[in-house]
Image: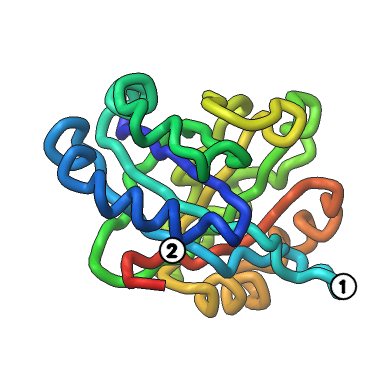
Amino acid sequence: MPGAVIIFRVPLQDLYALRNALYRFMSILQNGYGGTLIGISNDAEHVPPLRMQPLLNVGMGMVYFTKYEDAKRFSYNEQPFMSADFLNNAEVFIVPVLTPLLIGSHATALFITEIRNWENYSQLPDPKLMLTMSACGAVPLVADCKKVHLISGSEDRICGIRISQFPNKSAFYDWVKSDRGTKFRQAILRIRSLTSYIATFTRDAL
């Protein structure tokens, strides 16, 4: 298995605290657990865009681990980080990775669809419809699981997740609007009850 990611989702007012904590723990993450910071995000927006509230109004952080066991070990062992006050209202969960992410110094965009129960999984678009995104430099189906490992937060809010990686948001929207993305676009428009969003993750200071 190519590893796992830990996703931290916090109220926007706690994003700086999350960012600062992740940077303080970078040496421990890297040397003790093989972790790499994918980045911090403050621009997650609904797909399809909702007219009244396009943004999710949450901050996110994501760390990639080469081994799933190391992600769990970090969450159990590093209580000074995991028990920080700013995580009191956070959702934190581990997602197994099917395909390694492209990791570099530049920002990256992740297209994420979440399901709240097992039954919703059957409503997701056929994974084959997503393979055409490779032509625009994307990594389809980085993760595709029916149930995440929830560390903190409500089980009513997230059960499973599907993640694909794009160079940036523009590449995602170009693909969705193109002939290659037509069938996926039609499928995603039929599942508005699920939470789908695109977010830019960067290591630069916010």
Residue 197 percent location from the top left of the image: 65, 59
Amino acid carrying mark 2 in the image: Phe
Front-most of 40 and 2? Answer: 40
Q: Quadrant of the C terminus?
A: bottom left
- Vertical comparison of 33 with 35: above or below: above
Query: Does residue 134 appear anywhere in the picture?
Result: no
Residue 177 percent location from the top left of the image: 67, 76
Give the distance between the C-alpha atoms of the residues marked 2 and 1, in whole angstroms: 24 Å
Question: Is disc 2 placed on a helix, strand or loop?
Answer: strand
Q: Which of the 4 quarters of the picture holds residue 183?
A: bottom right
Determine the residue positioned at 50% across, 44% down: 8
**Residue lying farthest front?**
85
How crowded pointer 1 is (Cα within 10 Å; few <14, some 14-19, many 20+) is rated as: few
- Vertical comparison of 206 with 121: above or below: below
Badge 1 is on which residue?
Answer: 52
Image-based side of 16 in relation to 160, left or right: left
Badge 2 is on which residue?
Answer: 201
Amino acid carrying mark 1 in the image: Met
Front-most of 191 and 20? Answer: 20
Determine the residue positioned at 37% across, 42% down: 99
Residue 16 percent location from the top left of the image: 45, 61
Question: Is disc 1 placed on a helix, strand or loop?
Answer: loop
